[in-house]
């Protein structure tokens, strides 16, 4: 069995609403509106379940965990954020009800409104039957370790949920507007910083039941993890609230295989082990590929038991 944990779906009503909400004078809104115009609206698989199922069958993928991508439902207007979260979660949950053997779904939360996000988390998981959460790597430039978000993590920890941390418009977007650098590099750096902050701030130490997924092979965490530990060793401010080096927490993260580059995959495998790797494709974005995701795992030449864990066993263990 093959379960793709990194697959995006956009309800058409959602696409219409975020286009209406975009502030075209704001650089960050301009960036995600451009993604919507150039990459989402031009790709029917983003909202067509029938096309998606056909392409999953062709790639040999049995199940996808659906999630929203940029800009998710992170709007400063509370009523807007709540309404978008509710309608989107209901749309994804409905797909799962219609195709229970093919889809799981990750709930979006109306952040930065933490109380409302906790209410929607419970509704999505306990009443809609959704299977985990998707958060942004930053919430409208707020870092994920902001103290205001701690109650959210504590409730997710109580429920033992998986949290997929997907890139949002990255910090420093001003310098990433050419050559598709936001997608090529900025997204990965933003999720890396988000994960490091969750480790250094103590969120991962305090909330040990969270199953945190960092896409795109963990950003650049496998390649800089020793450097992060060296900061812990040499900088007193890095030791203020955690009792172990950051690698103690970061090697417990789950990482999907969206890289498709064998040396990088082997670095991640050596860093976190087969028990923390997940099949992921970033479908249906053009930089993603279900076929390459499956092939890259097979090319690792893992023992059959480890290959099965990457293809499906690890996902089944963490998705509610």
Image: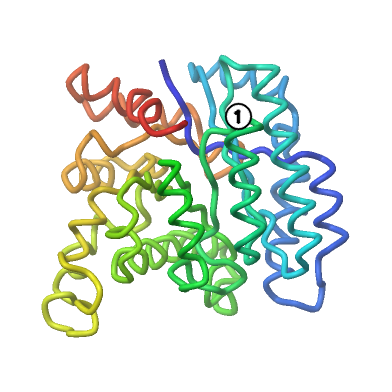
* In this rendering, position of residue 276 left or right of residue 244: right
The percent coordinates of residue 115 (x first, y second) are 62, 61
* Above or below, comparing residue 134 to residue 290 in the picture: below
The percent coordinates of residue 244 (x first, y second) are 15, 64
Q: Residue at x 39, y 34 (%)?
A: 318
Specify the quadrant that holds the N terminus: top left
> Which residue is at the far left?
233
- Residue 200 in which image quadrant: bottom left
* Above or below, comparing residue 84 to residue 187 in the picture: above
> Which residue is at the far bottom?
236
- Identify which residue, 103 or 108, lies in the foreground: 108
Residue 216 in sight here: no
- Identify which residue, 137 or 208, lies in the foreground: 208
The percent coordinates of residue 106 (x first, y second) are 57, 39
Q: Residue at x 61, y 37 (%)?
A: 284
Residue 134 in sight here: yes
* Above or below, comparing residue 143 to residue 160 in the picture: below
Tell me if mark 1 has few (under 14), some (14-19) or many (20+) residues whose alpha carbon lies within 10 angstroms of its own. many
Q: Identify the residue under disc 1.
A: 129
Q: How many numbered markers are drawn? A: 1
Circle 1: element type: loop
* In this rendering, position of residue 260 left or right of residue 242: right
User: How are the colours assigned in the image?
Assistant: rainbow
- Residue 260 in which image quadrant: top left
The percent coordinates of residue 302 (x first, y second) are 20, 25
* In this rendering, position of residue 128 left or right of residue 165: right
Q: Residue at x 70, y 22 (%)?
A: 51
- Residue 45 in which image quadrant: top right
């Amino acid at each position: 069995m093959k379960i793709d944990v990194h697959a995006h779906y956009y309800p058409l009503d959602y696409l219409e609403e975020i286009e209406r909400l975009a502030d075209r004078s704001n650089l960050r809104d301009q960036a995600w509106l451009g993604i919507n115009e150039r990459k989402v609206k031009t790709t029917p698989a983003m909202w067509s379940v029938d096309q998606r199922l056909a392409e999953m069958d062709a790639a040999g993928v049995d199940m996808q965990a659906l999630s929203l991508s940029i800009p998710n439902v992170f709007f400063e207007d509370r009523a807007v954020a709540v309404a978008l979260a509710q309608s989107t979660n209901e749309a994804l949950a409905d797909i799962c009800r219609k195709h229970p053997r093919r889809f799981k779904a990750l709930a979006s939360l109306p952040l930065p409104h933490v109380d409302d996000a906790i209410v929607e988390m419970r509704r999505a998981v306990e009443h809609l039957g959704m299977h985990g959460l998707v958060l942004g790597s930053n919430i409208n430039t707020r870092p994920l370790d902001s103290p205001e978000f701690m109650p959210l993590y504590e409730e997710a920890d109580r429920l033992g949920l998986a949290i997929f941390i997907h890139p949002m418009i990255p910090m420093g977007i001003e310098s990433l507007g050419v050559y598709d650098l936001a997608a090529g590099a900025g997204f990965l750096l933003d999720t890396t910083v988000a994960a490091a902050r969750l480790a250094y701030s103590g969120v991962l130490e305090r909330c040990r039941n969270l199953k945190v997924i960092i896409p795109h092979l963990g950003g650049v965490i496998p390649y800089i993890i020793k450097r992060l530990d060296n900061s812990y060793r040499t900088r007193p401010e890095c030791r203020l609230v955690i009792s172990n080096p950051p690698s103690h927490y970061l090697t417990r993260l789950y990482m999907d295989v969206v890289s498709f580059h064998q040396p990088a995959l082997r670095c991640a495998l050596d860093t976190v082990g087969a028990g923390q790797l997940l099949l992921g494709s970033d479908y249906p974005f053009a930089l993603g590929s279900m076929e390459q995701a499956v092939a890259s795992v097979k090319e690792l030449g893992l023992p059959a038991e480890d290959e099965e864990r990457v293809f499906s066993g690890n996902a089944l263990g963490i998705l509610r």
